[in-house]
Structures are given as structure tokens and as C-alpha cells.
Amino acid sequence: MLAPSLSPNPSVNTTTLPARPSLRPSATPAPPDTQSPPLPPPQTFDILAPLHTLLSKLLPATPDAPPGLDPQHLATEAGAIKLRLRAARVAVEALGDMNRGIEEQEEEIRALEEKCEKQRDILRGLADVIKAGQATAMELD
């Protein structure tokens, strides 16, 4: 809140501003600003359609019909799906922060929440200063 100060000149209206919050860095360091690589296309992770096709080849069309794919050839047919899974795994590992643990991420979340709360406090203080300034301006009118 603004508090009027005593001035030797009564025609001068001076006010004392509230103490500014410290702009020094907090004890918890901010996470480094890293650029993560772009996300891979959605097709990288689309294995359901090929898997469904493979499984449908294993099942007979009717109860008395033989299966469409000999189970001995299953490994060969599944190779394409394995390659897609491997490519998806590589794509996920290339994303940023995949090597960080849950505790480290939770610590970063707490630090960011604290930072947000401090910024909200600063904004509230600025709003109070503006309101007090408007009230003072109205008193002078």
C-alpha cells in the first residue's frame, strides 16, 4: 500500500512506494532453456493398422477355413512392425528431457510454481500501486 510521507512543502504530495520484491535469482536454479527437437510425424507411432492386418491374416475368415498366414511365416511378417516400433523408440529417445527422472521433473514443476506465485505477487503489488495512484489523482482533482 502507498503511505503518504511528510514533506516540508505541504503543496507537494509525495508517496512512499512499497518495497520492491528482490529481483535476485532464487535458491533453486531455473531449468536451462533447451530447444527440443520437433515432434515426429504421427505415422511414426501408427502400428495398430499393420498389427491388425497381421493378426487378421492369422485368423481364419470362417471357422472351417484355414488361416491366411502360416504361423511359421509370422516372424517374417512381423519384421515390418518391429522396424516401426524401433523407429518410434528412437524418435521418442530423441525428444528432449527423456533422460530425466520423475523426481527431477517434479522439482522443476515446484520451482516453476513458486516462480509463478512470485510473479502473481508482483502483479498484485503493481495493481495496488495503480489503484492508489488513481485514488490520489482523484483526490487532487
Image (cartoon, rainbow, N blue to C red):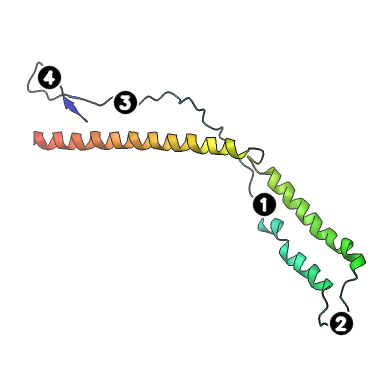
Q: Residue at label 4?
A: 6
The percent position of residue 47, horizontal first and vertical second, equals: 73, 61
Residue 12, placed above or below residue 89: above
In the rendered image, the quadrant that contains the C terminus is top left
Give the residue drawn at x 79%, y 72%. Answer: 56
Q: Is residue 54 left or right of residue 134?
A: right
Label 3 to label 4: alpha-carbon separation: 21 Å
Q: Quadrant of residue 85?
A: bottom right
The amino acid beneath tag 1 is Pro
Give the residue furthest to the right. 72
Label 1 to label 3: alpha-carbon separation: 45 Å
Q: Residue at label 1?
A: 40
Sequence order check, earlier mark of 1 and 2: 1
Which label sits on residue 61?
none
Q: Is residue 29 left or right of residue 55?
A: left
Sequence order check, earlier mark of 4 and 1: 4
Residue 54, placed above or below residue 120: below
Using a 10 Å C-alpha cutoff, classify the residue at mark 3 as few (fewer than 14 neighbours), some (14 to 19) or many (20 or more). few
The amino acid beneath tag 4 is Leu
Q: Residue at label 2?
A: 65
Q: Residue at label 3?
A: 20
The amino acid beneath tag 3 is Arg
Give the residue drawn at x 71%, y 48%. Answer: 91
Using a 10 Å C-alpha cutoff, classify the residue at mark 2 as few (fewer than 14 neighbours), some (14 to 19) or many (20 or more). few
The percent position of residue 79, horizontal first and vertical second, equals: 85, 59
Q: Is there a contact, CB below 8 Å, between mark 4 and mark 1? A: no
